[in-house]
Amino acid sequence: MPSKKERVKGIKGYSDFREFLQHKDLDAVVISLPDHWHALAAVAAAKAGLDMYSEKPMARTIFEAREMVKAVRRYSRIFQTGSQQRSDRRFRHACELARNGYLGELQEVYAKVRGISRPCPLGGEPVPEGFDFDMWLGSAPEATYHPKRVSGSYDCFGTAWRSWREYSAGHMSDWGAHHFDIAQWGMGMDGNGPVEITPGSGENADGLTFRYANGIGLIKQRGPHEGDVQFIGDKGWVGVSRGRIWASSDLLLSLRMKPNDEHLYESRDHKQDFLDCVRSRKRPICDVEIGCSSVTICLLGEIVTRLNRPLKWDPKGWRFVDDREAEGLVKRPMRSPWIL
């Protein structure tokens, strides 16, 4: 077994991804950066002719997510959003039950997700030697350094960048990108979206509701049954979490889809699905447009929570209806010299 030093010998680190993308022998990249960096890196990678596996949530703003879709399609790239629950058989089974009428007429859907981020109040600390804080900020607003501003720990509540509005929408997008994603999959709403969003209440904005044109509501809170995501119909229900699935009847859990039922994309391994699609050039299970549709739900929830009033959304035009203030939050200024 070679030593650690021997194993990493010859591996070069880069402080600027643009320099890395100049290599001519690359096929694909993994985008594992803070949320506010995803769009810039993805658009640059698409222009360089590279396929991408990108961490969720797909982008910091709705505008950025749309620009990622445009770039991936323009340059004919493969893009897998890292919402790996789609590659779990339990989540797929729950969605197929909902999609094929085995729960009866779908009444409402619940997704257990918490609240949004807040502006970062921290700063004024000396920048550690060797850390390019200006590059870390990128397009985000000018700020002064604090370790809890830049920490990459999985915390959305005050000790890491996921906590702060400048870089993330908080738990609403960090876990919404998982659970809202599954909710829309089971509702058959990929590429679509709600027409009205009403705010919730309390610190976590529980009760926040996305209402779709068919009348079904996606409610951001723990549902009445088991499971982080719950589909409730007039004849039964199913709930699902990582590693567990529950239903109103054991028969639903053991049910096999019929040949004429709608069979959803089956992936048993999210990363392998990406690699297979790089070779086949087929769109993966969580393609860029699906990632965009899912993160849009998260960001609509953030905007409604920030404004604390109901809003109407046009899912085909990707815009708020007759609301200039809300429309102003679809996009945000980028700090020079960064542009999309």
Image: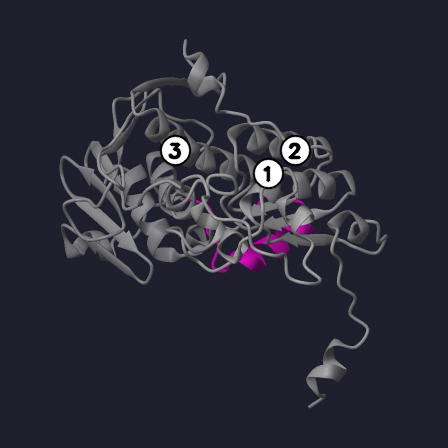
In the image, residue 13 sits, relative to residue 114, either above or below, namely below
Q: Name the residue under label 1.
A: 140
Could you tell whether 111 is left or right of 3 in the image?
left
Q: Do the residues labelled 2 and 1 touch (CB within 8 Å)?
A: yes
Residue 189 seen in the current view: no
How many numbered discs?
3
Residue 110, image x, y percentages:
25, 40
Q: Name the residue under label 2.
A: 335
Neighbor class of circle 3 (other Cα within 10 Å; few <14, some 14-19, many 20+) is: many
Under tag 2, what secondary structure? loop
The one of 36 and 123 positioned closer to us in this rendering: 123
Neighbor class of circle 2 (other Cα within 10 Å; few <14, some 14-19, many 20+) is: few
Q: Name the residue under label 3.
A: 302
Residue 190, image x, y percentages:
44, 33
Pick the quarter of the image with the C terminus: top right
Q: Quadrant of residue 111?
A: top left
Which residue type does callout 1 highlight? Ala
